[in-house]
Image: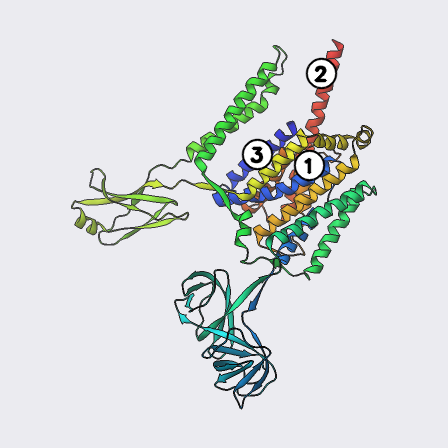
């Protein structure tokens, strides 16, 4: 518990220091992104904590994330194929006919078609005049004979706007795609259908000039989402099983096995992807909601007040409970109340921040003009303002009120001239001001990965602390040989730890690629294993095994993310020494933690000796 409190204190110190040094740190967007990244790294850190508790190590986490993160979009790749494209066997210019490889399914007289790939001057746009079996007659006739080509039906269009078309009988749905066909028969760019309203299509691209029509593209994914997820997550679990068997059965060193895995899995990924960037682009928007969705939005003010109140109450109850255990005259009251008092102080601080950030009415003075309108900058999130005026030495009187469109950015309000105001409300007005009456509460979103981390953390904590198998893991980490002699099947526990670690790394890989939306095999997941191991060690996991708490690991992951965020936001900290700063902080934190443990052990030993002497 002391290790957790120590790393929590360091996290709070870095958090407050960053907030003081950077105005952007406490903005909702940054905090939401910080929570999301903490959740993602927290998940993989919990996985590696299981391995470290057994006395092992896993250096292949980053490469497993790369394998899964690149493998998922690779399996979910979508091909778009032209609908109704027909293969041409021969072109006869004299009779203006084409011979198709098979009878056409959707082609009739009057349809417009595009002929392409004929390797002659015959390519272009035509109108079908007759269809007889596999023979198609065109108008005008093709300019040259050929023995090959492709024939595609072109849908007639009319302009509906800059990014919209009117296409009668298109049969398209949102997220389908179309290819533009120009007047000279050339293929243009491809556009995605954003929305469909009857015959009107709203497109993702602007409609080009000289457009003659479009043809449909059929969406053909390589695999379905459930199949792809099953493959990549199953592969990560299989990797964990493979590692566990090599370490438990063949007695290979974990460092060697997972170091080889680090190289092997990234090499495999670069091989099957041919070192090409993998991404989901604009596909699978529902799947991406696993990471991008916000499951709740809470007002920052009330969040701070509630958190502060809870911490204040916890600190008070904790201090009362600890003070009851102190014997009179023992001299340990101050030490026992240190952390409860710190908790209560933090609660008071958050309460003060919550009360201090509540919005109040704000008056904005205006340099009034007799004949010119005045533009006034309003604070962000303003929803209602009142324009007031006063005569020389008089009281302020309301001229008008106005609702303002909600925006997170600064807004503008145009205030009429004094001459115009006098025409609406007579008076010798000389001064004007705008009073911000109401502002929308500042809210912060809780990203979906935060709840995934909560679920994983609770399950891992219950498993580790409240099941016999969790006790087996801790016992084996303290002394594997003694655990084996006591009847624990240590081989199975080692395999279980590596399967859990690889499985959570695979889950992390899925979430990372859905968040970033693309993955480069050469560097996706680089150093993630070091971040995860550092978070676990900072959170109280001993590399010797047998120690560790899930809460401490999550706090350690949060500390790593806040440190990285601080280096990014604080101007005088150069980003190119990011790893040096993080490494130094980790080293100092671990060193201080070890010194505190030794000092506590010495005090405990002195107390035992004193009790024996008495």
Q: Which residue is mark 1?
A: 537
Q: Residue furthest bottom?
A: 94
Residue at the image position 56 percent from the left and 20 percent from the top: 319
- The spot of residue 538 in percent (x, y) is 66, 36
Q: Is 255 drawn above or below residue 150 in the view shown? A: above
Mark 1 or 3: the one toward you: 1
Residue at the image position 45 percent from the left and 75 percent from the top: 212
**Left or right: where does residue 204 sit relative to residue 337?**
left
- The spot of residue 210 in percent (x, y) is 44, 76
Task: Give the label on residue 263, or none.
Answer: none
Q: Is the residue marked by circle 1 packed among few (<14), some (14-19), or many (20+) residues within 10 Å?
A: many
Residue at the image position 77 percent from the left and 50 percent from the top: 260
SS state under label 2: helix
- The spot of residue 576 in percent (x, y) is 62, 50
Task: Give the label on residue 607, or none.
Answer: 2
Asked where in the image residue 160 lies, by quadrant, the reply is bottom left
Residue 570 visible (yes or no): no
SS state under label 1: helix
């Amino acid at each position: 518990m002391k290790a957790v409190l120590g790393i929590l204190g360091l996290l709070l110190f870095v958090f407050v220091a960053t907030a003081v040094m950077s105005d952007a740190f406490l903005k909702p967007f940054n905090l939401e992104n910080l929570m999301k990244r903490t959740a993602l790294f927290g998940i993989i850190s919990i996985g590696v904590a299981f391995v470290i508790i057994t006395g092992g190590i896993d250096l292949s986490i980053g490469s497993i994330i790369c394998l899964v993160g690149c493998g998922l979009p690779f399996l979910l790749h979508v091909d778009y194929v032209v609908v109704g494209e027909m293969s041409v066997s021969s072109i006869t210019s004299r009779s203006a006919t084409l011979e198709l490889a098979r009878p056409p399914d959707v082609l009739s007289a009057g349809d417009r078609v595009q002929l392409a790939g004929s390797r002659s001057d015959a390519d272009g746009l035509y109108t079908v005049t007759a269809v007889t079996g596999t023979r198609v007659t065109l108008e005008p006739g093709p300019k040259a004979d050929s023995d090959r080509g492709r024939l595609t039906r072109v849908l007639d269009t009319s302009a509906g706007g800059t990014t919209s078309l009117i296409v009668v009988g298109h049969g398209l749905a949102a997220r389908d795609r179309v290819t533009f066909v120009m007047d000279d028969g050339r293929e243009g760019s491809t556009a995605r259908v954003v929305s469909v309203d009857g015959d009107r299509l709203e497109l993702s691209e602007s409609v080009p000039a000289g457009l003659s029509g479009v043809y449909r593209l059929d969406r053909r994914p390589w695999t379905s989402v459930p199949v792809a997820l099953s493959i990549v997550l199953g592969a990560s679990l299989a990797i964990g099983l493979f590692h566990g068997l090599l370490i438990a059965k063949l007695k290979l060193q974990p460092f060697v096995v997972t170091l080889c895995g680090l190289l092997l899995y990234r090499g495999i990924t670069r091989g099957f992807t041919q070192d090409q960037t993998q991404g989901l682009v604009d596909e699978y928007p529902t799947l991406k909601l696993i990471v991008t969705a916000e499951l709740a939005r809470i007002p920052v003010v009330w969040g701070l007040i509630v958190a502060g109140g809870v911490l204040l109450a916890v600190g008070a109850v904790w201090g009362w409970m600890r003070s009851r255990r102190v014997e009179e005259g023992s001299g340990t009251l101050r030490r026992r109340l240190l952390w409860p008092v710190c908790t209560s102080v933090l609660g008071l601080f958050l309460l003060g921040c919550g009360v201090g950030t509540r919005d109040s009415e704000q008056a904005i003075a205006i340099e009034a003009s007799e004949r010119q309108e005045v533009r006034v900058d309003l604070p962000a999130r303003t929803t209602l303002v009142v324009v007031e005026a006063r005569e020389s030495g008089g009281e302020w009187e309301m001229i008008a009120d106005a609702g303002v469109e909600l925006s997170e950015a600064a807004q503008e309000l145009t205030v009429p001239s004094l001459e115009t105001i006098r025409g609406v409300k007579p008076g010798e007005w000389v001064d004007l001001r705008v009073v911000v009456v109401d502002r929308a509460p500042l809210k912060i979103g809780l990203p979906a990965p935060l709840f995934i981390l909560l679920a994983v953390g609770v399950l891992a904590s219950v498993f580790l602390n409240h099941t016999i198998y969790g006790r087996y893991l801790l016992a084996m980490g303290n002394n594997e040989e003694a655990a084996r002699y006591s009847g624990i099947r240590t081989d199975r526990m080692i395999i279980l730890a590596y399967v859990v670690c690889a499985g959570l790394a695979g889950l992390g890989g899925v979430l990372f690629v859905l968040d970033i939306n693309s993955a480069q095999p050469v560097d996706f997941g680089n150093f993630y294993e070091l971040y995860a191991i550092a978070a676990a060690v900072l959170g109280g996991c001993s590399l010797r095994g047998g120690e560790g708490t899930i809460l401490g690991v999550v706090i350690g992951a949060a500390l790593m993310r806040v440190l990285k965020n601080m280096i990014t936001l604080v101007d005088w900290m150069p980003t190119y020494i990011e790893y040096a700063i993080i490494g130094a902080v980790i080293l100092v934190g671990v060193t201080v933690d070890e010194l505190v443990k030794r000092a506590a052990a010495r005090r405990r030993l002195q107390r035992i000796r004193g009790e024996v002497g008495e």
